[in-house]
Structure formats: structure tokens, C-alpha cells
Amino acid sequence: MEARLCLIFFLLPILSFLSLSDAHDLQIVNAERRIDLTSHIVKVFLTFKVENTGTSPASEFLLAFPPAQADHLALVKAAVATGKKKKKTYIPLDVNPTELPDAPNGAKFASISLKNPLNAGETATFEVLLELTHSLEPFPAEISQSESQLVYYHDSAIILSPYFIKQQTTFIKTPSTRVESFSRVDPTNRVGTELKYGPYADRAPYSFSPIIIHFENNNPFAVVEELVREIEVSHWGSLQITEHYKLAHAGARHKGVFSRVEYQSRPTISGISSFKHLLALLPPRVHSVYYRDEIGNISSSHLRSDSRKSELEIEPRYPLFGGWKATFVIGYGLPLQDFLFESPDGRRYVNFSFGCPLLETVVDKLTIKVVLPEGSQDPSAEVPFPVEQHLETSYSYLDVVGRTVVVLEKTNVVPEQNTPFQVYYTFKPFFMLAEPLMLASAFFLFFVACVAYLHMDFSISKS
């Protein structure tokens, strides 16, 4: 044991040195960053042209994030681009969080694994998508019904990277031309709704130049603080979905008194940052849709359905201003044959979409419960990104041993994560007869009891 510990402590500095040497062997020939601030979900598109200036092949590329940005990072996607212009193709790459020793200012890192190592002297082009939540800070923090919403965005004019960058440019797009103020790091240029920082040449690794942009953003800051989705699987031909929402407006808080007359008479000015309807994309062939809250059914909803998709437009009982909240439930049924399949190894699996069906909505905490039929065994879930998983047991009508429930939990969920996931399990067809046999036995015993009661004589003496 002592020898193993000594070997581990001896290898750690070597591995750290190798990782740092790999970082110095790469350099970014050209970097372009486009930041989209038109929604409350910040989208960052990065394009890197990377060259291997070392002597050994490189198998990974590192992304660096400031600590404040890493805390709000919801999604990281990467792909390598091959070909030119219209014939360009993209190969997805695996991205995993990693750590580097002695990282300056607490920087966080993610490692992009390359399909093919980048040999010495070769170049490759990477494209990265980042999505950040809760990154826009309302200022002022409170506004009246007739005021527009102004927000702050903090970032760096220089792309934070562990590599030397020969040339880089940053473009920032705002929702409107109203920009109260922005930091200048020459050269800086503004045209319409776009800010341009750069080009900057020959920047050393970990260069950083903080900037602040104060601009108008009246788009709805719809945040689902908690969403619990229950997917009940029945082998008798249906899939029942029940979704419990706790919705909030995460923008600047509303101050003063709300005037319904002003809100309806001046819809383009009064309450411009509020929202009174949301759009949910549901699977096709949906049926038995309902929408209600604690008071009861809400009739202000519209369903449009065809063979490819279903759109449910809902309206809360009142428009939502900054700081206001609403709770409601959406339920619907789906045909089982569209979502239940059989794998080659004989197991059955449910294929459904992860995430929230509401468009342009951030989910702070998402819980998905897949209720399997009674008698299901060996459940397992396959999700394309890390989630917390555990099993529960629930009881419904006529259940004896209970139903297995696969519970998936994730925080900070964005619409880009509405991707399919699968829940596998084994099931013996005999269990489908358990409830019919139970009902038949109960009716038979009741019938026997009635017959026995009619043939029994309870009189004290004969007449």
C-alpha cells in the first residue's frame, strides 16, 4: 500500500506536467465568438482554428470558463468541422469537465476529446455552443408597469483560453438598439444591434479584459423553478403524462399597483416585459389534454395538432410581471405504440423526450418519474448527459407489489436538452393477466357469497 501511494504521488506531477505541455503545444490561429443576448438564455457560439505547434499528437482541446460563468453554464456542445462552405460537415465531440492544477483566478475547464489526434503541424476547426442561464442581471432591480426592463451582462472582450491566440474577434447581439452603456476595449465598434470587440492579435494564455453591457431586454424571463413530470406506462395501450409546474418571472420585480385598464388599453407600452401566454410543444397524436391550477380547470388554452407535432398555447389566470409566480398542471395521453419498443436483447424500453416542453424556458429543477407496469424488473435509464437517478415504488389501483418508478433529476435545464432518453426494463406477459384475474376472482367470490347468503336460514324458529 505504501509503495502504491508513493507511486501515485510520483505520477501526479508528471501527469499535470504532461497536460500543461499539451496545452502549450497547441495555439489558436483564429477565434471568433458570437454572443446572442436576445433572450434571457445567453447563447455563445465559438469557432476556433487550432494548430498543433508541438512535436507530438494532441488528443484533446481545453475550454476555459471564468468561475462566475461556469456556475451558470447549462450546456456545452462541440463539433469538428470538415470540408468547405456548402460541403462542410460536423462531427460531434465528447465534452467532459476537467481540472488543471494552478489554474489562474479559479478558472474552470472542459475537455473536448478529438476523434482523431491532431498531428504536429496540422490544423483543425472546432465549433462550440455554450448556453448560460441567470446571466442577465436586471438593473434597476424593480420597475413599474410602464417601464422597460434594463439588464447588465458581464463578460470579457478577450476570450479566456489556456492557449496563445494569434487573432480573435467577438460579436455581441442585443435585442434592440437601446444600449445604455458598454465598456470599450479598443478597437470597439457598434452598428445597430451588434457590438464588435476586436480584432485583437497575439494574446497570451489566460488573457482577460472585463466588460459590462447595459441594455434593454423586454423578452419574457420565464423560469420554471420546479417541474415534476410523471410518465405512467400502461401495457393496455396508453401513456399518461402529468406535469406539475412552478413558474416564475425572473426579470426585474414589479413595483407599485397593477392596473388592468392600463394593461389592456396600452398593450405595447404597459407591461412590455410581462408575459401572459406560453407555447408548449407536445408529441403528435396527443389526446385528453387538460390544463388546471389549484382553483380548477383553466379554459384559456388552445391546442393545434397534426401528424408531426402538437402545439398547446396556454394562458395563466393573470399576466406575470417580474417576481410573480404561478402554479399549474398540464396532463395528456399518448398512444403507447409511438413510445414503447423492444430491443434486440428482448428488453422493452420507453423512448421519450427529456426537458421541458415550454419554449424559451429555463428549468431550475427537473424531476422525471417513469412509472413502469407492475411486475417490471431490472430497470435502467440511458440519458445523453449526466443526471441523478434512483428508484422508487408507487401504488395505484389494484396493485399488489407496487410499481417500479425510475426517477431522473437534473438542475439548470435549457430547451436544447429536449433530447430523447430511454428507460429499459424486462416484463413477463403473465403479469398483464394479474389485474383481470384479480377482478374476476373478486366478482366470483362476491357471487358465491351472495348465493350462500340467499340459501342460509337465519330465523330462530320455523313458522
Image: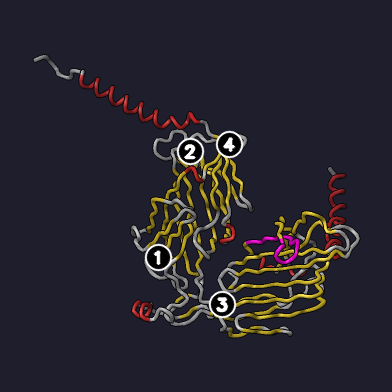
Q: As shown in the figure, which amino acid type bears the numbered disc 2?
A: Pro
Residue at image coords 77%, 54%: 115
Lower position in the chain sequence, tag 4 or tag 3: 3
Lower position in the chain sequence, tag 4 or tag 1: 1
Q: Nearer the viewer, residue 31 or 444?
A: 31
Within the image, what quadrant is residue 2 found in?
Answer: top right
Q: Secondary structure at mark 1?
A: loop
Using the numbered discs, state the Cα–Cα distance from disc 2 to disc 4 in whole angstroms.
Answer: 14 Å
- Examine the rendered structure and indicate whether residue 132 appears above or below residue 355: below
Q: Nearer the viewer, residue 77 or 147?
A: 77
Residue at image coords 47%, 80%: 143
| Span shown in magenta | 75-88
Using the numbered discs, state the Cα–Cα distance from disc 1 to disc 2 in whole angstroms.
Answer: 34 Å
Lower position in the chain sequence, tag 2 or tag 3: 3
Q: As shown in the figure, which amino acid type bears the numbered disc 4?
A: Arg
Lower position in the chain sequence, tag 2 or tag 4: 4
Using the numbered discs, state the Cα–Cα distance from disc 1 to disc 3 in whole angstroms.
Answer: 24 Å
